[in-house]
Amino acid sequence: VRDAPYEAAQRANDRAFLMHPSNRLVRRAILSCAARS
């Protein structure tokens, strides 16, 4: 049995991230922050 609510939220999250116009900038910022720590 899959956790439907979580899966739906994750799918919506991924969709929102992909739809984000500056997702590359966000990803780059996250990677740079991760590299600093």
Image (cartoon, rainbow, N blue to C red):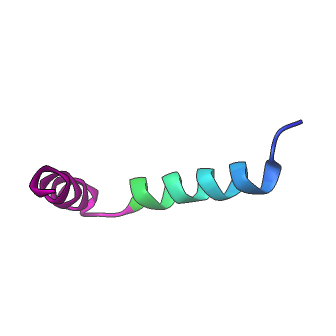
Q: Position of residue 23 (x, y in %)?
A: 28, 58
Q: Position of residue 5 (x, y in %)?
A: 78, 57
- The count of marks equals 0
Q: Position of residue 33 (x, y in %)?
A: 16, 60
Q: Nearer the viewer, residue 18 or 32?
A: 32
Asked if the magenta segment contains residue 36, the reply would be: yes
Seen at 61% across and 50% down, the residue is 11
Please indicate whether residue 15 sits to the left or right of residue 20 in the image.
right
Seen at 89% across and 36% down, the residue is 1
Find residue 36 and report its image quarter: bottom left
Asked if the magenta segment contains residue 25, the reply would be: yes
Please indicate whether residue 31 sits to the left or right of residue 9 in the image.
left
What's the magenta bit mostly, secondary-structure-wise?
helix
Residue furthest toward the top? 1
Stretch in magenta: 20-37
In the picture, the quarter occupied by the C terminus is bottom left
Seen at 72% across and 54% down, the residue is 6
Residue furthest toward the front? 37
Please indicate whether residue 3 sits to the left or right of residue 27 in the image.
right
Q: Position of residue 3 (x, y in %)?
A: 80, 46
